[in-house]
Amino acid sequence: MFDVEFTFRVRSDWEEGRRLRGWVAATKSIDSVVSAHGAIFGEKVLLPTAEPTFAFAIPADGSLPLDGAAPSIIDHQGDPTSMAEIPDLGARLVSMRMEHPDPAFVEALYRELSIDRPPAIIQGADVRYRAQIETPTGLKELT
């Protein structure tokens, strides 16, 4: 899942400074997303397998959707408090930008999916992210 089976690719991306490789978008209807865009997002997988509390859409080969240009999709299955258990350590996303060879295609996909606050997309040779994070120790950039 999330490209971890592709250790060569993950290592290559890391060495090229492509460490921020994707992101997750929530939906209330993962079945609709998978039905309309299964070729991009894959199949619905209930997790954890023993007692599922949420669902992810995961491509069959475990890769990131569109090499990370499309978000991974999560459905909290009607439990809006599921994120409440994660401690707030004071980090806040200030901005996120993605480079992509075809920004118009990705922007159209985001619009079709009604993505709330998607990353800004600019022309670039490959998929590459930059995120500005405000932390208790100052502004940090993830790439």
Image (spheres, rainbow, N blue to C red):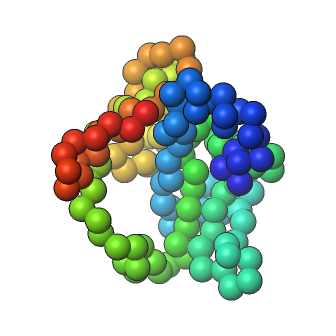
The image shows residue 42, relative to residue 69, as above or below, that is below
Q: Quadrant of residue 50?
A: bottom right
Where does residue 133 sit, x and y in percent of width and height?
28, 45
* Residue 103 vs residue 67, the one in the foreground: 67
- Whether residue 15 appears in this view of the structure is yes
Quadrant in the picture for the N terminus:
bottom right
- Whether residue 41 appears in this view of the structure is no
Badge count: 0
Quadrant in the picture for the C terminus:
top left
The image shows residue 39, relative to residue 27, as above or below, that is above
Which residue occupies the extreme right position in the image?
61
The image shows residue 78, relative to residue 108, as above or below, that is below
Q: Quadrant of residue 81?
A: bottom left
* Residue pictured at 66% horizontal, 57% vertical: 57
Where does residue 45 sit, x and y in percent of width and height?
72, 66
* Residue pictured at 48% horizontal, 16% vertical: 124
Where does residue 98 sit, x and y in percent of width and height?
43, 30
* Residue pictured at 60% horizontal, 80% vertical: 53
* Residue pictured at 67% horizontal, 76% vertical: 48
Q: Tell me if 19 is positioned left or right of 120 in this view.
A: right
